[in-house]
Image (cartoon, rainbow, N blue to C red):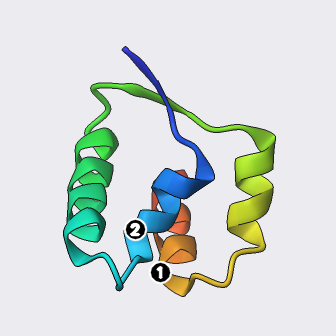
Amino acid sequence: MKVYLDTSVISYLDQKDAPERMKETQDMWEFFKKGQYEVYISDVVVYEIKNAAWKNVKFYWIIWTR
């Protein structure tokens, strides 16, 4: 199954003002890393992540792309 992730979904990896949503997103991220789904993002999302102020999101991105 293919899944498209938009920047707003990825931003919840470090959304401290919404702890339940942040935890759900982090759990989903770990699930996606297992490789059972094909995860897609657009060039715009890549640009937004690279220029984001969210340090933890950048960390997750680095881990994901290795």
Query: Quick check: 15 above or below 36?
Result: below
- Viewer-side label of 2, 1: 2
Report how many numbered discs are placed on residues in the image: 2
**Disc 2 + disc 1, Cβ < 8 Å:** yes
Residue 13 is tagged as 2
Percent position of residue 47, x then y: 80, 58
Q: In this view of the protein, which residue sits in the foreground, 13 or 61?
A: 13
Which callout, 2 or 1, points at the residue further toward the start of the chain? Answer: 2
For mark 1, what is the residue? 56
Left or right of 43, for residue 22: left
**In the structure shown, which secondary structural element does the residue marked by tag 2 occupy?**
helix
Q: Amino acid at mark 2?
A: Leu
Q: Is residue 15 left or right of residue 19?
A: right
The image shows residue 52, relative to residue 32, as above or below, that is below
Vertical side of 43 occupied by 29: above or below: below
Q: Amino acid at mark 1?
A: Asn
Q: Quadrant of residue 27?
A: bottom left
Q: Residue at x 55, y 85 (%)?
A: 55
Give coordinates of residue 24: x percent, y percent: 21, 58
Q: Which residue shows up at 36% across the image and 14% down it? A: 1
Residue 66 shows up from this direction = no
Evaluate whether residue 53 shows in this view: yes
Residue occupying image coordinates x 32% and y 32%: 35
The residue positioned 58% from the left and 82% from the top of the image is 54
